[in-house]
Image (cartoon, rainbow, N blue to C red):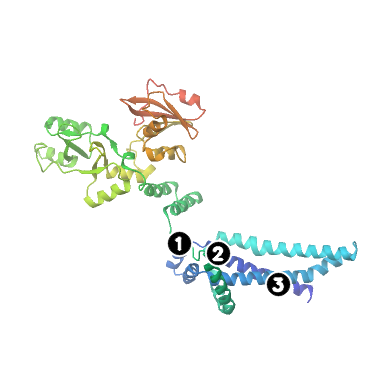
Amino acid sequence: MSVTQSLLLLAGIILASAFFSIAEIALAAARPLKLRQLVDEGNHNAQRVIHVQTAPGHYLTVVQIGMNALAILGGIVGQGFLTPVFTRLLENHLATDQAVAIGFTASFVLTTSLFIVFTDLIPKQVAMAIPERLATLVIGPMQVLNTLFKPLVVFYAWVVSGLIALFNLPRQRDESVTPDDILALTQAGALSGSLAASEQQVIENVFELETRTLPSAMAHRDGILFFLLDDTEEHIRTRIASEPHSHYPVCDGDIDHIVGYVTVKELFQRVLNNQPIAFNDPSLVHKPLVVPDRLTLAEMLRQFRQTGETFALIVNEYSLVVGLITLKDVMSIVMGDLVSPWYEEQIVRRDDHSWLIDGVTAMQDVKRALDIDSTPHEEEYETLAGFLMTMLRRVPKRTDSVTWGGYTFEVVDVDSYRIDQVLVTRAGDGPAAAKLPVDNPVDPRG
């Protein structure tokens, strides 16, 4: 065989090996979601790839037969014509034995390098970049080869099945998609630019509803505006004009004895129709939805859907009212930074190194704003105030501070044991912290 024929044969072997390498990696890397999209677009080969992925044994057997046979054949061909070429070149300068040894080594290194580069590295990198496209292109020829090598494939499949059963090894990969998988995909989409950062955040917030409990999003007890049964009409009119809300609890004596609630819509209708406003009217006061404070936000959404309500009062294990929540509050958590400007801001960035944060801010929001992965004893608290109490093991007082995750959390305002405001600075940024006069704390809500 001439040198030209040998070179062409070696090139053909390398191309065939590259085909099998692409077929192997493309099948393994092809994403089922992408393949299903191609099926919906009318690509029948994508459906064949999905079918093979569910039971890839015969497919991979053909790949391994082809790759190993071609690698051995390529070594024989390469050594057969390259070793004499190198030997003849070296015989003019070295002894015959040395020329043969070095020529054999050179041909071995060159042949191996050709296979590593052109049948392994390049094909696999390309297949990892566009796996679905290549998988649909090679599936036809691979199924033809599967038919041609069927007797050999069946024999090897029988041997492999026996060994897998003997050693109790897994046969199929788990195709289930977990929330972590979806979040990882959305993060990758945001990094690649195919998904807007705000859209990725909304998706992450939706999954967060399953872990966040009501205290992280509710209006707390001391911020609830309510009416008493015996409030005068003049007082009611003045109150709703100065502090308008969509719902108002109606209580008998104090907030822990709730009778029901009224809506601002019905109150306005009565005002416009010159009708009296009296809470002893059963048609005006509605029975409230009362839920425990251990519910997650996802469970709260289900409660809203089942009852048709958009407002709920939250009680603790002692049946004391601890807060209230509306459907708007839950959706504000989902929408995150996309909510309208009217949404109350609890985290105010003062400069590049410091933040002023309301004590009732959910720790998930604090961690996201500060880019902190985790905090100690996360299961013991919901809010920034709870984090500080857990770390200090007591009720914090003004100027108390905690350092964690590269940040210093300093209490700057306390109101009747309630932590109103916390100044957060990057650890070591003392001058930034000194900018805030503690005698005149800033209201984060403006």
Secondary structure under tag 2 reads: helix
Q: Amino acid at mark 2?
A: Ala
Counting labels gives 3
Q: Tell me if mark 1 has few (under 14), some (14-19) or many (20+) residues whose alpha carbon lies within 10 angstroms of its own.
A: few
- At horizontal 74% and vertical 72% (from top left) the residue drawn is 77
Quadrant containing the N terminus is bottom right
Q: Earlier in the sequence, mark 2 or mark 3?
A: 2
Whole-angstrom CA distance, mark 3 to mark 1, is 37 Å
Q: Amino acid at mark 1?
A: Glu
Pinpoint residue 8: horizontal percent, then vertical percent.
72, 72
Q: Tell me if mark 3 has few (under 14), some (14-19) or many (20+) residues whose alpha carbon lies within 10 angstroms of its own.
A: some
- Residue corresponding to mark 3: 73
Q: Which label belongs to residue 26? A: 2
Instruction: Identify the image quadrant of residue 446.
Output: top left
- At horizontal 25% and vertical 48% (from top left) the residue drawn is 304
The reply to whether the C-beta atoms of the residues labelled 2 and 1 are less than 8 Å apart is no
Question: Closer to the camera, 33 or 375?
Answer: 375
Q: Which label belongs to residue 175? A: 1
Pinpoint residue 302: horizontal percent, then vertical percent.
28, 51
Secondary structure under tag 1 reads: loop
Instruction: Identify the image quadrant of residue 262.
Output: top left
The reply to whether the C-beta atoms of the residues labelled 2 and 3 are less than 8 Å apart is no
Pinpoint residue 345: horizontal percent, then vertical percent.
36, 35
Whole-angstrom CA distance, mark 2 to mark 3, is 24 Å
Instruction: Identify the image quadrant of residue 342.
Output: top left
Q: Earlier in the sequence, mark 2 or mark 1?
A: 2
